[in-house]
Amino acid sequence: MNEHVVDVGKRHIREINEEIQEACARGDRIRVVNTLSRHNLGIGLPDGAEVRFEGSVGYYCGGLNTGATLEIERNAGWALGEGMSKGTITVGGYSGMSCGAAMMGGTIHVRGDAGPRCGVAMKGGNIVVEGRIGYQSGFMAHAGKIIALGGAGDSCADALWEGEVWVAGDVGSPGVDVKVVEPTSEQVDEVNAILEPLGLSDGSRDWRKMVSGQRLWFFESRDAGAWLMI
Amino acid sequence: MCGIAGRILAGRGGFGAVGRDLVELMDAQEHRGADSTGFAVYGPPRNTGYVVRGMGFDRKDMDPAMDDLARSLRDHGSDFLAEPAIITDGQRHYCFRIEIGDPRDMTAWVADVDTLSDRIEVQSCGRSLEIIKDVGGARAVDEKHGVREMVGTHGLGHARLATESDVRPNASHPFWARPFPDVAIVHNGQITDYFKWRERLERRGYRFLTGNDSELIAVWISDRMRAGLTMDQALKLSINSIDGVFTYMIANAGGIGFAKDRFAMKPLVVIDRDGDLAMATEEQAVRRIFVGECDVINYDGPSLTGLWGAGDRDLAA
């Protein structure tokens, strides 16, 4: 497999992404250098592509991924992997606000912490964060799992649909309409099966599994006082 | 959307090319709002006298308006210390920079000069603060006003995407905390209850010259500090007092403080190398100042505040 090096610098983002797509089409393995935290790097990458970003990337990196494997050496900005349907994204450091926003499938693996609203409105797939997930993580997640190994911030798992937030470690505070349930051993096995290929499986974790209390699903405006925090 | 930035040069009491760095920080964020761009630069402080920056709205009225400005100063025991510098281009408005002696009472002079605000608007006043703002992107404003050449200890920058008021040069940021010398803010977000707060502050004698929601913040904080709060206390109080989404930075001669709303809606990214500081909305902007890979602090959480001193000053005091 050939390696193709893409130099980002100050070039126009469309030119950079076209170069990445062309290299993917040739079947090259891709190394993206001099990223300078630029936005929109590697959008809509195809199934089977392998792209490594050296340094840090800006907003929306790996968005609309359809099956590529992306690796980001350091930090990612807002909305990493937004709307992705398949594939794997690994972040070496911190992943900013709204990591995995509205993703439908695939896996995001963050080695550091994740910012606020991690997995906001996600509709499938898994987000694994080795550190702590930020404020209001899992906000309105429809489906999929957010798995945090280092705790969670305030308002955790706020207003969930059928998404699940699994936390090992401290939770700042639960969000509205959250139910903390005792997971069955089958459910824990299922989570460990997600963690296993990442080398993170550990049978001794004390999990807090958060799901929707399902009261907000039937929101009535006359009950607004019970929900509004403002 | 808007983009904001701040810069504090390391080296206790040292001056440097803070204008150049602020232009770079804002050029990197021009996509966040190219309606207008502004800068607040803290230059070498003077012991007496002030630098006044402002804008007149009609070039044809320039000479009589500047005469009226001079007259208002003389009424308050002050005057121009040198010929005013006027900056014009093809547009109807013009900008000016004047150095003045100390008015007997700053608040009284500002109240007086504000009676001219349909023709001429004082936009900053300070021993060291100068606010430069105009329509267009960072490079355009720099070319017109020579921001790159401005030397100082620290400063702020802003790129504006107009949401709450007109695209007018005087509705741009940074905003001066009228009439408090040397206080300026930049804000990313929207204040939703600004009408309410403005009315309260107006009843206490403060004046607001634009329809911009952000103009409120600097005055709000300064008013609380005048009432005895430290900047740190005032910043913390603002989070639950002012409604809306915001990340704002406020600067005075001592340094820069910031506050973020309860919902963590707007970002702030900082690189701090032993007091050599760059702050911005986006990481790619601070990377214009510190190019190599280095540790970046993401102030992503809700209800955060912070203070950074400039020079040998400590803002926490």
Image: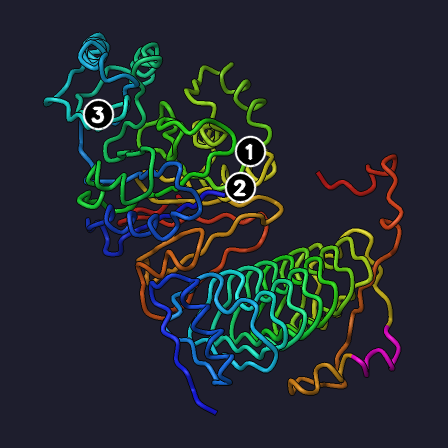
Q: Position of residue A224 (x, y in %)?
A: 82, 38
Q: Which dot marks residue B271?
A: none
Does the residue at mark 1 contact the one at mark 3 (Cβ under 8 Å)? no
Which mark sits nearer the N-terminus, 1 or 3?
Answer: 3
Q: Nearer the viewer, residue B205 or A86?
A: A86
Task: Indicate which disc, 2 or 3, sits on the residue closer to the N terminus.
Answer: 3
Residue B98 as seen in the image, left or right of residue A122 = left
Counting from the top left corner in percent of width and height, residue A148 is at 68, 71
Residue labelled with disc 1 = B191
Q: Nearer the viewer, residue A167 or B118?
A: B118
**In which quarter of the view is residue B93 placed?**
top left
Q: Residues within 10 Å of mark 3 (few under 14, many from 20)?
A: many
- Mark 2 and mark 3: Cα distance apart in space: 30 Å
Type of the residue with mark 3: Phe
Secondary structure type for disc 1:
strand
**Horizontal arrangement in the rendering, residue A199 relative to residue A17 (left or right):** right
Q: Inspect the image, locate mark 1, and give the three-letter code of the amino acid beneath it.
A: Ile
Q: Residue at x 51, y 67 (%)?
A: A76
Asked if residue A8 lies left or right of residue A151, the reply is: left
Report how far apart the C-alphas of labels 2 and 1 lie in the structure: 7 Å
Residue ID for mark 2: B246
The residue furthest bottom is: A1
Mark 1 chain: B
Quadrant position of the C terminus of chain B in the picture: top left
Q: Is residue A182 above or below residue B303?
A: below
